[in-house]
Image (cartoon, rainbow, N blue to C red):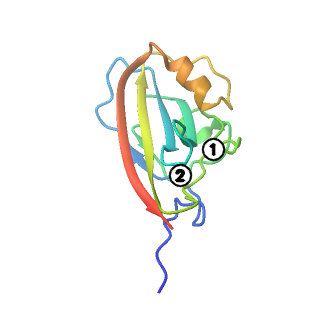
């Protein structure tokens, strides 16, 4: 008997999961999301699965399966950056061994970031400095 592979996994449909964001500060001008795997076997690093920014704050429901495009039409022009593979958009869990934790870190910001599409996680984190109003965290585990 096999096991069920979620559609968000790389060996599944490799679709970004649906997310619901609640309690967004009324001062928020944009939302950013970073999804990663902190359980990679290199100390002090994590593997980035998704970088999304400049999501309008009224989009509190992020639909499943966001297209792998730099400018996300379904999110009113929000932008996607490069994941750990250097590609635009979401890439799902595919742990090389064991069970890994996957985090979706949500940030509400007091500004729309001056970043072009395709920014890296590091560039996004630098641009967010001093602009974070709120943070949220969703964690899950996946193993092979």
Location of residue 108 by image quarter:
top left
Q: Look at the numbered disc 2 and give the secondary structure of its residue.
A: loop
Left or right of 38 in this view: 21: left
Residue 62, position as x, y percentages in the image:
46, 44
Q: Residue at x 43, y 37 (%)?
A: 105
Mark 2 / mark 1, whichever is N-terminal = 2
Location of residue 79 by image quarter:
top right
Residue annotated with mark 1: 89
Task: Tell which of 103 and 31 is nearer to you.
Answer: 103
Residue annotated with mark 2: 16
Q: In the rendered structure, find residue 133 and report the number of the disc placed on it.
A: none
Residue 87, position as x, y percentages in the image:
70, 43
Q: Residue at x 64, y 42 (%)?
A: 84
Residue 47, position as x, y percentages in the image:
57, 43
Q: In the displayed orientation, state which residue is furthest to the top.
A: 130
Q: Residue at x 66, y 46 (%)?
A: 68
Q: In the displayed orientation, state which residue is furthest to the bottom.
A: 1
Q: Residue at x 61, y 39 (%)?
A: 73
Residue 108 appears anywhere in the view: yes
Crowding at dot 1, Cα within 10 Å, few <14 / some 14-19 / many 20+, comes out as many
Left or right of 80 in this view: 58: left
**Disc 2 + disc 1, Cβ < 8 Å:** yes
The span from disc 2 to disc 1 (Cα, nearest Å) is: 9 Å
């Amino acid at each position: 008997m096999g096991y069920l592979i979620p559609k968000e996994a790389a060996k599944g449909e490799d679709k970004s999961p649906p997310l619901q964001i609640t309690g967004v500060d009324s001062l928020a001008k944009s939302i950013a999301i970073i999804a990663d795997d902190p359980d990679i076997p290199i100390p002090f690093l994590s593997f980035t699965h998704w970088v999304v920014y400049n999501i309008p704050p009224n989009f509190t429901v992020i639909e499943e399966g966001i297209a792998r495009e730099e400018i996300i039409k379904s999110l009113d022009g929000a932008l996607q950056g490069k994941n750990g593979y250097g590609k635009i958009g979401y890439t799902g869990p595919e742990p090389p061994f064991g069970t890994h934790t996957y985090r979706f870190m949500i940030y509400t910001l007091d500004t729309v970031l001056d970043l072009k599409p395709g920014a890296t996680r590091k560039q996004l984190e630098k641009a967010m400095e001093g602009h974070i109003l709120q943070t949220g965290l969703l964690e899950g585990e996946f193993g092979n």
